[in-house]
Image (tube, coloured by chain):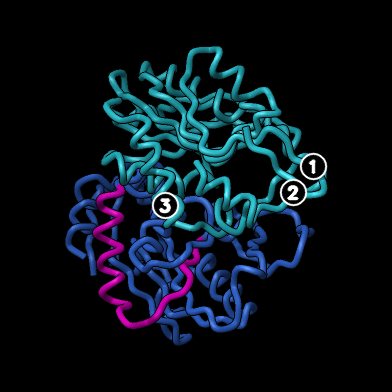
Chain colours: A blue, B cyan
Amino acid sequence: MKLLEERIRRDGKVRAGGILKVDSFLNHQMDIALFEAMADEWRRLFEGERVTRVLTIEASGIGIASIVAQKFGCPALFAKKTETVNIAGDVLSTTVHSYTHGRDYNVFVSREFLKPGDRVLIVDDFLANGAALEGLIRIVELAGAEVVGAAIAIEKAFQPGGDTIRKSGVRVESLARIRSMDDGGHIEFC
Amino acid sequence: MKLLEERIRRDGKVRAGGILKVDSFLNHQMDIALFEAMADEWRRLFEGERVTRVLTIEASGIGIASIVAQKFGCPALFAKKTETVNIAGDVLSTTVHSYTHGRDYNVFVSREFLKPGDRVLIVDDFLANGAALEGLIRIVELAGAEVVGAAIAIEKAFQPGGDTIRKSGVRVESLARIRSMDDGGHIEFC
């Protein structure tokens, strides 16, 4: 999606260690008009898929998921993160490894909000190693619901998550796919 | 706001210890159509206030803040929580006590996204003791920006936060103000 790629080129900042900082428009300050354009594009891509739930993970996916759910006319749901295993009530949970923080954390969703028959569009701001997305896919499978696909803002295509998940049969629609970045700030899109 | 009060009566669950569970529509699963109605009401209440930023705190305020920012035609910004004091870059930060978790945590916002001259509407799902809201107000003051007011979904009016903050001169617009709740599930609104 040209609009997002141009925005990344203009306002994104490449940091050492393969970090792309997009906190001026995506995951700290949020440009809602941009989110609307992105959601319109996913609406076009997933047209006819009868999405019943938009699922994301706290915290930075929530804003995008809210606007996507608005466009699809369905509720949004965000998986919660916790470091404790014991959670009150009947929940779907899985463990996700954070490469950023170098530790595992639990992710959970209340079972009452994801049911067999639900058609779930998973939304997130980034896809790199794919650990978070794989965790969300497992949650949907535990619910007996169906993953319609993954709507990703920025995919680091030089990391393995996107390819692995596509090979597993899940449709992944990333609006900006980064082929390479260097510390000089140069970003090349696929 | 009748619509929100009715929804709380219908789908809210009172738990021991003054806990009101609204995770089916407000802070886990999110009813975006309801958020739009709430945002329209705040738009009416803060008409003419020339809001330039909507500020909230992760995680459960982000969905509401995104829809509010959409209606006001400005960016949303969410304060991040961390337990570490050292944060990279030039940030505005303060310490907030969590009564729920019985500990202090740091809250921060990048200084580049809140400037003198900004007119900030603070958004959150709950107001009880007021610690989070007071923290966000301090952040706006540290930036030299102005707090236009606080847009709160549910205020526990039997806890002191709302009164204290109103007395300090900040306009607080809570769409549902709970006077009392009992463990039998009865909720009385102001």
Q: Where residue B64 sits in the image (x, y, percent)?
A: 45, 46
For the residues labelled 2 and 1, the Cα–Cα distance comes to: 7 Å
For the residues labelled 3 and 2, the Cα–Cα distance comes to: 27 Å
Disc with the residue nearer the chain's start (2 vs 1): 2
* Residue that numbered label 3 is attached to: A63
B88 above or below A86? Answer: above
- What residue appears at the point 63 percent right and 57 percent down from the top-left corner? B11
Name the image quarter holding the C terminus of chain A: bottom left
Any part of residue A32 in sight:
yes
Q: Locate residue B100: give its quadrant.
A: top right
Decide: marks 2, 1 in contact (CB < 8 A)? yes
Q: Where residue B57 sits in the image (x, y, percent)?
A: 51, 38
Bounds of the magenta segment? A32-56
Q: The residue under label 2 is which amino acid type?
A: Val
B171 drawn magenta: no
A149 above or below B1? Answer: below
Most extreme residue toward the top is B168
* Residue that numbered label 2 is attached to: B14
Q: The residue under label 3 is which amino acid type?
A: Gly
Q: Where residue A33 sits in the image (x, y, percent)?
A: 25, 50
Please, which chain is the residue tagged with disc 2 on? B
Q: Helix, strand, or loop for circle 1?
A: loop
Task: Classify residue B166 as left or right of residue A95.
Answer: left
- Which of discs 3 and 2 lies nearer the camera? The answer is 2
Q: The residue under label 1 is which amino acid type?
A: Asp
